[in-house]
Image (cartoon, helix red, strand yellow):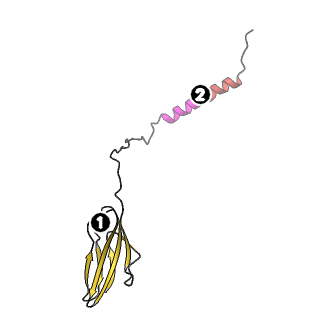
C-alpha cells in the first residue's frame, strides 16, 4: 500500500521498509511539520494526522493508508531538538592588518643589532680587566 516514504526536512530512521510500521524522525528546532514524499499503491488513500505545530521534544505523526478493506497505520515519532540558545552579547574580533612584506631596512638592522650584542658580550667575557692599585 505504501511503497516508499521520504522525509525531506528530517532524518528518518530506520530506512523505510513497507512492512515496518514504526519509525523515528529527528528534526531541527525550526521545523513545525514534516515535508513528506511518498508513493502509494494504486487506489490507496492516505490521511496524515498530527503533522502540524511540533513542540520541542517528542511528537507523533500517523499515516493512515487505506486501500479498499485494508488499513495500515505508520507511526512516526518525531523528535524536535531544543532551540539553540544564543548569547545576546556578541564580541566582534578586532580586524588586524598584518604587513606581509617588511621594509628593506629591517633585516640588516636586526643583523647589526645581533652583531653588536655578540660583540658586547664577547668584550665583557674575554677582555681582561685592569685592576687599579
Residue 120 numbered tag: none
| Residue sitting at x 56%, y 33% | 111
Q: Picture quarter containing residue 101?
A: top left
In the rendered image, the residue lying farthest to the top is 133
Question: Where 4 sits versus 98, above or below?
Answer: below
- Residue 4: x percent and y percent? 33, 81
Quadrant, the C terminus? top right
First in sequence: mark 1 vs mark 2: 1
Relative to 103, 62 lies left or right: left
Q: What's drawn in magenta, residue-wise?
A: 97-116
Q: Is residue 95 magenta?
A: no
- Residue 106: x percent and y percent? 49, 34
Local SS, label 2:
helix
Question: Where 25 sits versus 4, above or below?
Answer: above
- The answer to which of 17 and 124 lies nearer the viewer is 17
**Is label 1 in contact with label 2 (beta carbons under 8 Å)?**
no
| Residue sitting at x 30%, y 78% | 63
In the rendered image, the residue lying farthest to the right is 133
| Residue sitting at x 30%, y 61% | 30
Give the labeled residue for mark 2: 116
Residue 54 numbered tag: 1
CA–CA distance between discs 1 and 2?
75 Å
Amino acid at each position: 500500500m505504501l511503497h516508499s516514504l521520504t522525509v525531506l526536512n528530517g532524518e528518518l530512521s530506520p530506512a523505510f521498509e513497507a512492512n515496518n510500521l514504526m519509525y523515528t524522525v529527528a528534526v531541527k528546532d525550526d521545523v513545525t511539520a514534516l515535508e513528506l514524499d511518498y508513493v502509494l499503491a494504486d487506489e490507496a488513500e492516505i490521511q496524515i494526522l498530527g503533522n502540524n505545530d511540533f513542540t520541542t521534544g517528542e511528537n507523533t505523526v500517523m499515516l493512515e493508508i487505506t486501500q479498499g478493506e485494508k488499513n495500515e497505520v505508520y507511526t512516526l515519532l518525531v523528535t524536535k531538538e531544543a532551540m539553540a540558545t544564543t548569547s545576546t552579547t556578541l564580541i566582534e574580533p578586532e580586524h588586524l592588518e598584518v604587513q606581509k612584506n617588511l621594509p628593506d631596512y629591517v633585516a640588516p638592522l636586526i643583523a647589526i643589532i645581533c652583531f653588536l650584542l655578540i660583540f658586547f658580550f664577547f668584550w665583557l667575557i674575554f677582555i681582561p680587566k685592569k685592576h687599579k692599585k
